[in-house]
Amino acid sequence: DTEVTQTPKHLVMGMTNKKSLKCEQHMGHRAMYWYKQKAKKPPELMFVYSYEKLSINESVPSRFSPECPNSSLLNLHLHALQPEDSALYLCASSQDWTGELFFGEGSRLTVL
Amino acid sequence: GESVGLHLPTLSVQEGDNSIINCAYSNSASDYFIWYKQESGKGPQFIIDIRSNMDKRQGQRVTVLLNKTVKHLSLQIAATQPGDSAVYFCAENRGNQGGKLIFGQGTELSVKP
């Protein structure tokens, strides 16, 4: 299994809603990542988890809350988002933090 | 500041021609570089990588060249095909920053039949 699976593929939420994005990998990778990608722009790093511990937070607003329940799962909890947070949210994993990242297909988020 | 930049935002080539996509990076401490291909509606897909102790690496129809002196990276695609049409990103792994993979701005490759 060489896949990173993200759910849901599409999400529409209001500014007062609470929702979560989920990511799963079964490659035994120990590093997992959240990236945000706006249209026609490169992915921007948000968070890095290494061995289930948060190792990098790129000054992301607290309305985004990551969680790594175990080595295979990564969640991104969303609360009180703004319309400008609408984007494609990409999850990735890597064997460790020095190698190739494997990306999921992303969750496209629309905030109304 | 933090930047991995590309010289050209769009590139149009004829099917069968070779394509060259360029990338400049700013952090001389970066030790690992990756080229990704992203098709519309999909996540980035690994193409080829290169470590800083190498100047050149070849894959199937693709070659990556690294010039550390001028902090420049290029991706060469031989015999470009319509299926190569996508956005190509170079990415720089700043190993001294614990796994930060920073993406360049991207080049949109369009292959004309």
Image: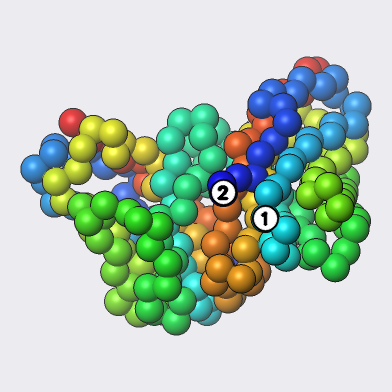
- Indicate the position of residue B92 as horizontal and vertical percent values: 66, 55
Foreground pick, B47 / A99: A99
* Residue B60 visible (yes or no): no
Please name the residue shown 61% across and 71% down the image: B96
Query: Does label 1 or label 2 sit earlier along the sequence?
Result: 2
Quadrant for the C terminus of chain A, please: top left
Please name the residue shown 69% across and 36% down the image: B6
Q: Give the residue type that dot 1 points to.
A: Asn
- Indicate the position of residue A7 as horizontal and vertical percent values: 34, 54
- Indicate the position of residue A69 as horizontal and vertical percent values: 30, 76
- Crowd tier of the residue under label 2, counting other residues whose Cα lies within 10 Å: few below 14, some 14–19, many 20 or above: few
Q: Is residue B3 left or right of residue B52?
A: left
Report the Cα–Cα distance between label 1 and label 2.
8 Å
Q: How is the image coloured?
A: rainbow
User: Dot 1: what SS?
Assistant: loop
Image mark 1: chain = B
Foreground pick, B74 / A75: B74
Depicted B56 relative to depicted B25: above or below: below
- Indicate the position of residue A36 as horizontal and vertical percent values: 41, 46
Q: Give the residue type that dot 2 points to.
A: Glu
Q: Which mark is residue B27?
A: 1
Q: Are marks 1 and 2 in contact (CB under 8 Å)?
A: yes
Q: Residue furthest left?
A: A16
Q: Is residue B100 left or right of residue A47?
A: right
Please name the residue shown 85% across and 39% down the image: B77
User: Dot 2: what SS?
Assistant: loop
* Residue B5 visible (yes or no): yes
Q: Which mark is residue B2?
A: 2
Please name the residue shown 14% across and 37% down the image: A14
- Crowd tier of the residue under label 1, counting other residues whose Cα lies within 10 Å: few below 14, some 14–19, many 20 or above: some
Image mark 2: chain = B
